[in-house]
């Protein structure tokens, strides 16, 4: 079973060459003068007051993790919503179990106080 991979190889070559070309052109045509103001960190027009390597509360990471977890569920819910009629009762039961597991996870996180900010 030998397939023709020519178009795929051409597309891969084209993607890599465009990326490499952009990097080379940026290095050749970009500004070369390094001034003090250009190399300083910049945040919304306000000069940097403290170190950029400060400590963050772990709750920021928990909120990000919960967002990713519950955002991924839409990857499964949207396709199901498009074809739910053709899946019948079995598809409805399976999706009910899926949403039930997600609801149990949310209830657990809520009960543990992970969503409380104070």
Image: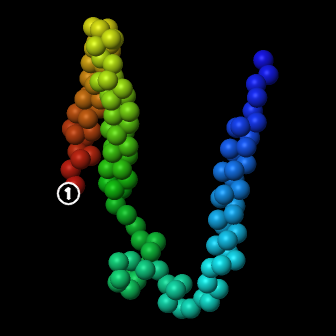
Which element carries disc 1, helix, strand or loop? loop
Question: Vertical placement of 118 versus 72: above or below?
Answer: below
Instruction: Give 102 or 80, whichever is nearer the viewer.
Output: 80
Residue 55, above or below 97? below
What is the residue that sits farthest to the top in this orientation?
89
Vertical relation: 105 (above or below) 22: above
Where does residue 118 sit, x and y in percent of width and height? Answer: 20, 57
Query: Residue at position x 75%, y 33% from top?
Result: 5
For the residue pair 67 and 52, the one nearer the viewer reads as 67
Between 26 and 72, the one lying in front of the other is 26
Pinpoint residue 49: horizontal percent, then vertical percent.
38, 84
Q: Is residue 81 above or below residue 15?
A: above
The residue indicated by pointer 1 is 118
Query: Residue 84 vs residue 40: left or right?
Result: left
Q: Tell me where residue 23 appears, x and y as whole percent.
A: 66, 67
Residue situated in front as seen by the camera: 61 or 14: 14
Q: Residues within 10 Å of mark 1 (few under 14, many from 20)?
A: few
Q: Which residue is depicted at the point 27% across and 46% down?
A: 114
Q: Residue furthest right?
A: 2
What residue is at 78 percent from the left and 17 percent from the top?
1
């Amino acid at each position: 079973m030998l397939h023709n991979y020519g178009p795929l190889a051409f597309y891969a070559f084209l993607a890599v060459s465009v990326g490499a070309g952009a990097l080379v052109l940026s290095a050749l045509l970009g500004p070369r003068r390094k001034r003090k103001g250009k190399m300083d960190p910049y945040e919304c027009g306000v000069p940097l007051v403290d170190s950029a390597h400060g400590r963050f509360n772990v709750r920021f990471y928990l909120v990000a993790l919960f967002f990713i977890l519950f955002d991924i569920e839409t990857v499964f819910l949207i396709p199901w919503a498009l074809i739910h009629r053709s899946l019948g009762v079995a598809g409805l039961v399976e999706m009910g179990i899926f949403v039930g597991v997600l609801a149990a996870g949310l209830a657990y996180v809520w009960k543990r106080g992970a969503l409380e900010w104070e």
